[in-house]
Amino acid sequence: MSLVIDGIHKHFGSFAALDGLSLSAPQGAFLALLGPSGSGKTTLLRILGGLEKPDGGTARFADIDWLSVPVRERRVGFVFQHYALFRHMNVERNIAFGLSVRPRRERPSRDAIRARVDHLLGLVQLGGLGKRYPSQLSGGQRQRVALARALAIEPRMLLLDEPFGALDAKVRKELRGWLRELHHRLGITTIFVTHDQDEAFAMADLVAVMNAGRIEQYGKPEDVRRAPKTPFVRAFLDSADGHRPPRLNFPSPQRGEGLDHVASAAKSL
Amino acid sequence: MVAIADTPRRGTNRVLPGFGLSLGFTLFCLATIVLIPLTALAIRPWSLGVGGVIAAVTAPRVVAALTLSFGGAAIAASINAVMGFVVAWTLVRYRFPGKRVFDALIDLPFALPTAVAGVALSALYSENGWLGGPLSLLGIKVAYTPLGVLVALIFIGLPFVVRTLQPVIAEMGADAEEAAATLGAAPARIFLRVTLPALLPALLTGVGLAWARAVGEYGSVIFIAGNLPMKSEIAPLLIIIKLEQFDYAGAAAIGLVMLVLAFTVILVLNLVQARLTARR
Amino acid sequence: MTRYARTPTEGGTAPRLLLIGTAIVFIVLFLLLPLLTVFSNALESGVPAALAAIGTPDALAAIRLTLLVAAITVPVNIVFGLAASWAVAKHDFRGKSLLTALIDLPFSVSPVVAGLAFVLIFGLQGWFGPWLRAHDIRIIFALPGILLATLFVSFPFVARELIPLMADQGRDEEEAAISLGASGLATFLRVTLPNIKWGLLYGVLLCNARIMGEFGAVSVVSGHIRGLTDTMPLHVEVLYNDYDFVGAFAVAALLALLAVVTLVFKSLLEWRYGDEIAATHRH
């Protein structure tokens, strides 16, 4: 079930968000789209999710002409930057939503849905919070509900748009590890968008560094970091742009990253 | 005016379904209920020919009616500008017993049928009315005079000014005023140079809305107006009279003039307001 | 955010009391007294007389007609409002501001002019006049005309309540629903509608008040045929012109009561669900 994207174009008026973009990834990959704002990474994600239609190019996934599949039928789990939880439904109903809107024939029984919701609540470590409403949850909890909701439909592809963007540094770090762990367990092809290079390099198997609608470099995190191919990539890796604006100031050592991280942070000062 | 900007980024996002259906239905309704009738209004006067139209709208009675409607609306709107400001300011900035009730009352002219307002004002200001009685002792006659028209127009225009100003005053806070005070300005000066200019766009909007509403007002006015041609006859009434005389074209001519004049003034007000807000 | 602390322009106690006093006096004089006059005049000859006035066949017919008009036009306005706000708030297209300006158009048109426009189309000397007459179809001086005129003046209410609200709420939830496999209808019913229910109720409340109270436009198209095409406001006028003041004010009192109920519910909704009603309130 590999993903092959070829020559995707997307314009908004005269602005070219995506300019002939191509990449491919194997099944079950954890892929990061990394770049500054305006680089087109969210646009690409939304095209893959069916929320945006490209002006040109093709995409195949699992041997299907992906772009011709209507959104409803793609079975893509999309996690929005601001969670987009249904504010008038509690956590359980949010998670069950994708299952409850299936046509009668394909819809699981109420008990089956309930069982699945409970299972997912456990998976995202929110057991017991099923009756709460989104407004009663913290940012990190909402994020996990959004993820559970996306997972409920047994998606073929998981797409995350700046999943930890609105969270503070400590929660971000926890969720990073946790999401990585989850991907390991479930093995779903996962693509996430971020402008935080620490995040990208910590979590992904493959990183695509994007700029102005194009991929500047694409490869394994270590390879990209060690050997930046273009001036942009080099500058991006070095710059403060690639780091989250410091709120809780100091970088704490991640598994195996510690010194690299400190060194690059030092270079940006 | 509801302001929804033409959205910049997304381009054609037809991902959410139902666009064609909803837009089509909306346009259909607008066309049949609003646009086509107004087109009929725009076309009909010209059956008199250009000369006929001009003659129709410059007839003394018509001019008098238009002057009363537009001029009376302007005076009423000006009074509402001042009093509406006072009311809005008081409701936002001060606390006093029964404030909630008074605040809710502001919307009365919106909720009350115009005919009810009309008969109520007429009774109130008639010679044995609660207000009409004392006023007549002072020699002031309100009912069946242009003054009555004015009172009615003030009534229906007030909420526009107050409701437009309230949120702006509330949001304004006191920062700018406090800054001016620390710089040594006296309260009156602060008000004139800091507070008022900040509220001017909203005030203009409210006044414009009040004026537009007053120009076309019928129900609240005809009971108290006296309706004497050339004296206290408002334009909408003249339209009805002409209709009853089967002078469709003449009625349409007056209606068209009212429409065009009202739109022009609203457009000018919007431009002025845009200028004022752009300067910030 | 209201501030009750003394701000520099609020001056001392004297100016404050003066302002409050002026405002209160103005509100009482211009708003409260007219309202009270209606009830006082209605009850001038006692409660039985007022009730009798409401119970006459013509009055009852007027009440029935008003209710009928509301029963038909409110749902139409709801459908229109939902359709218009779905198109405008959840999609991008050129000419959006033109469309919203058109939706606001009836607010700038005098009700009498609106009625006139319909007469120009359907009246005896109107575009379709002869044709309608030949087919014995009555629009002007009959219910259809009243419905059309009422629709014209009430159109904007629900739409301009919902458009800012739905725009404010954004598209994310709807997109999420679609990506989870929901159909457009399911999305609308299960995601969009629950989010706007209070705004919708608020819009319907205002719309209904306007519909039941409409006078100018209906006055032009209805022909004032007693017992047949008189709505309640028109009936008030008829009785008043007949010098039946108790009758006129009795019916007016009913309408005033409706206005008071509207105001009460409006305040309640604003108080409890303020942020779920349109972000800004402009009438």
Image (spheres, grey):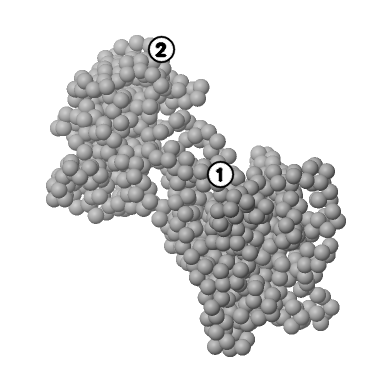
Residue C18, image quadrant: bottom right
What is the chain identity of the residue bearing mark 2? A
In-image side of C218 versus A60 (left or right): right
Residue B99 percent across, percent down from the top left? 57, 70
Instruction: Indicate the amino acid at tag 1.
Output: Ala
Can you say whether A233 is above or below C75 in the image?
A: above
In the picture shown, does residue C139 fall above or below B101?
Answer: above
Q: Is residue A70 found left or right of B197 in the rendered image?
A: left
Residue under the point 54% across and 65% down: C212
Query: Residue A242's x, y, as percent?
Result: 38, 25
- Give the residue at x 31% y 41%: C183
Which residue, given by chain and number where applicable, does mark 2 sit on?
Answer: A231
Q: Residue at x 65, y 72 (%)?
A: C237
Instruction: Please give the label number shown on residue C196.
Output: none
Q: Residue furthest right?
A: B60
| Quadrant hosting residue A159 | top left
Q: Which mark is residue B31?
A: 1
